[in-house]
Image: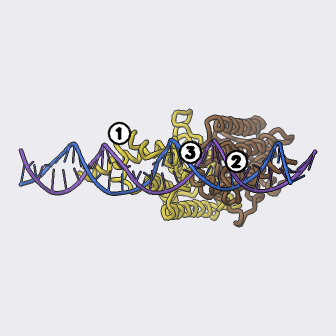
Chain colours: A brown, B yellow, C purple, D blue
Amino acid sequence: MREEISAYKRERILEEAVKLFYERGFSGTTLDDIAGKLGVTKPFIYTHFRSKVELLEAICRPTIEMSLGAIAEAAQQPGTPSERLFDGIVTFSKVVLQRQANIAVYFREEKNLSETGLAAINALRKRFDRVLSELLAEGVREGEFTIPDVRLAALAIGGMVSWAYTWYQPEGRLTIDTVGHRLAHLALQMAGVHSVEQFATRV
Amino acid sequence: MREEISAYKRERILEEAVKLFYERGFSGTTLDDIAGKLGVTKPFIYTHFRSKVELLEAICRPTIEMSLGAIAEAAQQPGTPSERLFDGIVTFSKVVLQRQANIAVYFREEKNLSETGLAAINALRKRFDRVLSELLAEGVREGEFTIPDVRLAALAIGGMVSWAYTWYQPEGRLTIDTVGHRLAHLALQMAGVHSVEQFATRV
DNA sequence: TTCAGAATATACTATTCGGTAAAAGGACAT
DNA sequence: ATGTCCTTTTACCGAATAGTATATTCTGAA
């Protein structure tokens, strides 16, 4: 019970912090700013986080973990490589767009992470690239994909999706699901899949 | 003569600034750091730039202008849409990778720009997206491309290429030209071009 | 040699802001 | 009511650093 309340407060701090970091940047946001928006004071934040940088890590790390999780889970699902790639990109896109602010803060403020925090996150990203490359390679082996450079293609697909944090507008013409499906579709085209049409309305 | 020397010094400052901003971030870099690396003092920098933010703008703006220029020039060249898209992506990739640090600093430190500086750059980016979208639309009209959502495809292609600043390693296995050609190739696949092979060794 | 004017440095200010020690407030059991 | 423990605040420090006012040095002309 006590823990639940504490966890809730922690979440509220994170929510406000990511919002402000997203709008004004990490160094453009004061701990007093965050506290002020929450109607509390700065030392209150220090009862939940050791430092400003730890706050940043708490924003970035779980989000990158979710990104990796999205691809990794889809990759080990049953189904053809095309199906798994499609589903993986859809769910990965969902993470990127639902947690747009977290993703943006991570990519922008990476340099402000602690050395250990950055190392941990970098390891996750490496795994992300490996899982995606492996999935592409499997598709090539099974004759579904035509990809001259699998590692580069993985980076290209990952980039295409990650990049969405820079342009997606929640109030715009496209829903998160729509963007996810269209990006997944484009990923299959990049992979040289012939019968892409069948995925048009999938999931 | 006086002006040339002054321009040269200005360039040296910019060179060192972009390097340090790239390595340590904008707010992680002191004007004294930059001056120190150059063997001069802080007020010296102020004889060439009004403020730290102006320095940042001088790093970002010309680079974004070059990106736009790369696509815009290729788009109005003679040739089929496929050829123009291919060439445009190759030269755009070149800008991104040759000016990797500038691009990275821009995307990371955008929030630190002045309101007017940001507005100017945003206008350039809008034009970039429009030019690329228009090129894709033309390819669709002429039957070369198959693209359900042209605007989204433009963002996807732009993102795929821009993203390269996050992973490209100048000392790595791939040259800038190689990456450019492979990304252009992937862009054509995304656009649904059938005979992509003919572009494999183009340029 | 001297003297203007440009180029560059020294030395300083004012402020912002992450972090903390110590006090106050509040809930709850007895 | 009172004492205890947990939560939150008040009040403060010290370091960092963008920007500047003033001094100095250099250069090239006369």
Q: Position of residue D4 (x, y in %)?
A: 83, 42
For the C terminus of chain A, the image quarter is bottom right
Same subunit: marks 1 and 3: yes
* Residue highlighted by disc 2: A59
Up-down relation of residue B73 to residue A155 (above or below): below
Q: In the image shown, does D10 or A119 lie closer to the viewer?
A: D10
The residue drawn where x is 67% and y is 55% is: A41
The kind of residue on which mark 2 rests is Ile
Q: In the image shown, does C28 or A106 lie closer to the viewer?
A: C28
- For numbered disc 2, what is the local secondary structure? helix
Q: Can you see residue A15? A: yes
Chain on which label 1 sits: B
Mark 3 or mark 2, whichever is nearer to me? 2
Between marks 3 and 2, how big is the CA–CA gap?
A: 23 Å
Q: Position of residue A123 (x, y in %)?
A: 68, 35
* Residue highlighted by disc 1: B39
Chain on which label 2 sits: A
* Residue highlighted by disc 3: B165
Chain on which label 3 sits: B
In the shown orientation, is residue A44 left or right of residue B203? right
The residue drawn where x is 50% and y is 55% is: B64
Mark 1 or mark 3, whichever is nearer to me? 1
- For numbered disc 3, what is the local secondary structure? helix
Same subunit: marks 3 and 2: no
The kind of residue on which mark 1 rests is Gly
User: Any mark on residue A86, and which?
Assistant: none
Dots 3, 2 in contact, CB < 8 A: no
Q: Residues within 10 Å of mark 2 (few under 14, many from 20)?
A: many
